[in-house]
Image (spheres, rainbow, N blue to C red):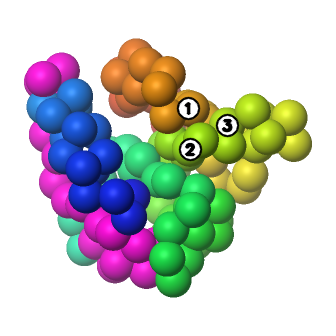
Amino acid sequence: MDDNPALRREIRRQLESAGLEVCGEASDGIEGLEKAREVRPDLVILDVAMPRLNGIDAARELRKVQPRLPVILHTLHADIIRSQGLPEGVAEVVAKGEPLIPVVLTLLDAPRQ
């Protein structure tokens, strides 16, 4: 979920190049929650700054619906969020510009608690 279509395309390209299937995209937090409830993904990547519902609040809501769902915050504000501790429902924080795929693969391989 990201409100920037070019960034969503780039993330999709990276994921598909790694052999992963992208089952949905969303341009804001509300749309993302609706899609996640519909398709039940194995992992969600959220931007923090999104219209209608930010990524931190979306992660919190996703946690209620799918408690074991790994959520990655993909954000320009990674250092700030890391310094405050991971928000509820967030498994990892990755800064835009940092490698995303290794984190995705690690979370998909990790046992779900």
Q: Find the magenta span and give its range.
A: 17-35
In the image, residue 109 above or below residue 69? above
Q: Is residue 20 magenta?
A: yes
Say which residue label 2 marks.
75
Q: Residues within 10 Å of mark 2 (few under 14, many from 20)?
A: many
Label 1 to label 3: alpha-carbon separation: 6 Å
Q: Which residue is mark 1?
A: 94
Question: Cβ–Cβ below 8 Å for labels 2 and 3?
Answer: yes
Q: Position of residue 35 (x, y in %)?
A: 28, 71
In front of the other: 33 or 17: 17
In the rendered structure, the answer to whether residue 11 lies left or right of residue 64 reads left
Q: How many marks?
A: 3
Residue at 18% from the left image edge and 21% from the top image edge: 18
**How many other residues sit within 10 Å of disc 1, few (<14), some (14-19) or many (≥20)?**
many
Whether residue 99 is situated above or below residue 25 in the rendered picture: above
Report how far apart the C-alphas of labels 2 and 1 lie in the structure: 6 Å
1 and 3 marks in contact (CB < 8 Å): yes
Q: Is residue 51 visible?
A: yes
**What type is the residue that disc 3 sits on?**
Ala
Going from the N terminus, do you reach mark 1 or mark 3 first? 3
- Which amino acid, by three-letter code, is at mark 1? Val
Residue denoted by label 3: 78
Q: Quadrant of the C terminus?
A: top right
Camera-nearest residue between 96 and 66? 96
Q: Is there CB contact under 8 Å for labels 2 and 1? A: yes
Tell me residue 17's x, y (percent): 12, 23
Q: Label 3 neighbourhood size at 10 Å, few (<14), some (14-19), many (20+)?
A: some
Q: Is residue 37 visible?
A: no
Quarter of the N terminus within the rendering: bottom left
